């Protein structure tokens, strides 16, 4: 089993990462049909954010991840749910078992050519693959430009262009195993305490990859930027959740 760079930040991930708006799951259901009763494989489940939301809509969900500590947090919070330590490039599920294979914030971490073949294997014909991401969408706001610039300067692994997920369908399309995919974008507004925004930043792999002293300088600078823009300590930030969805042939 490969190690995960998210295990060291499992607590921050669980405390700081946002969930997904109800309107987003409604948009997913417009494509896949009602989630209630569907067998869903939640890839890169982490601490179970999407797993819990999918379950709340009546889906039967198995969450899996390579990050053992992340899954321990998921199990501690939701002991009634199913979580499996597994690699998304080599799935421990039988052929044709799933109605939906989804990847919340995780598809980009996989060997996508191999992963799409595995997804096709575990999906029933007519089942769906879906990959989605939350993104802050405050482009053009002065504070957000400064915040992005601070991260790019401090984190060699970060580029603001990472929010562009247009390449996510490439392997799915190349495989010939899926019908042409579609994109769904759901805008929403995130209301979050400034201290929780910083916790969210700590949970990001490219921030954790920076040396501790540099990381703390970055987070102090982010806190300054955020504090000047939101002096009351409560942030209201435009967000969007973008999904790519394709149907198994």
Image (spheres, grey):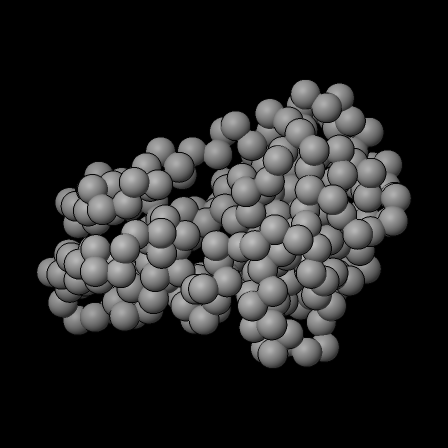
Q: Position of residue 209 (x, y in %)?
A: 35, 52
Position of 223 with respect to 54 (left or right) is left
Q: Please report the residue visible at 48 percent of the width from the left and 54 percent of the height from the top.
A: 5
Name the residue furthest left.
228
For the C terminus, the image quarter is: top right
Q: Is residue 105 visible?
A: yes
Q: Please report the residue visible at 68 percent of the width from the left and 78 percent of the height from the top.
A: 79
Q: Position of residue 146 (x, y in %)?
A: 16, 46
Q: Position of residue 183 (x, y in %)?
A: 56, 34
Please give the count of numbered marks on the rendered protein: 0
- Toward the viewer: 245 or 146? 146
- Toward the viewer: 59 or 122? 122
Q: Position of residue 51 (x, y in %)?
A: 64, 62
- Toward the viewer: 233 or 28? 233
**Image height of 89 relative to 12, above or below:** above
Q: Is residue 148 visible?
A: no
Position of 229 with respect to 99 (left or right) is left
Which of the 4 quarters of the picture holds residue 190?
bottom left
Position of 136 with respect to 62 (left or right) is left
Which of the 4 quarters of the picture holds residue 108?
top right
Q: Please report the residue visible at 76 percent of the width from the left and 48 percent of the height from the top.
A: 91
Q: Please report the residue visible at 63 percent of the width from the left and 57 percent of the height from the top.
A: 65
């Amino acid at each position: 089993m490969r190690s995960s760079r998210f295990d060291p930040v499992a607590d921050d991930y669980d405390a700081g990462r946002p969930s997904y708006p109800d309107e987003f799951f409604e948009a997913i259901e417009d494509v896949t049909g009602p989630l209630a009763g569907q067998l869903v494989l939640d890839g890169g489940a982490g601490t179970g954010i999407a797993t819990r939301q999918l379950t709340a809509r009546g889906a039967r969900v198995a969450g899996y991840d390579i990050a053992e500590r992340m899954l321990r947090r998921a199990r501690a919070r939701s002991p009634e749910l199913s979580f499996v330590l597994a690699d998304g490039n080599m799935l421990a599920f039988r052929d044709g078992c799933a109605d939906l294979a989804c990847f919340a914030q995780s598809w980009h971490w996989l060997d996508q050519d191999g992963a799409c073949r595995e997804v096709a294997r575990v999906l029933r014909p007519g089942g769906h693959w879906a990959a989605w991401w939350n993104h802050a969408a405050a482009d053009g706001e002065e504070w957000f430009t400064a915040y992005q610039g601070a991260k790019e300067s401090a984190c060699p692994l970060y580029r603001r262009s990472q929010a562009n997920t247009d390449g996510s369908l490439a392997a799915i399309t190349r495989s010939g195993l899926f019908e042409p995919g579609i994109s769904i974008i759901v805008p929403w507004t995130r209301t979050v305490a400034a201290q929780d925004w910083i916790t969210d930043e700590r949970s990001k792999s490219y921030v954790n990859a920076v040396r501790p002293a540099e990381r703390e300088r970055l987070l102090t600078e982010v806190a300054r930027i955020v504090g000047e823009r939101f002096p009351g300590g409560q942030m209201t930030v435009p967000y969007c959740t973008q999904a790519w969805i394709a149907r198994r042939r």
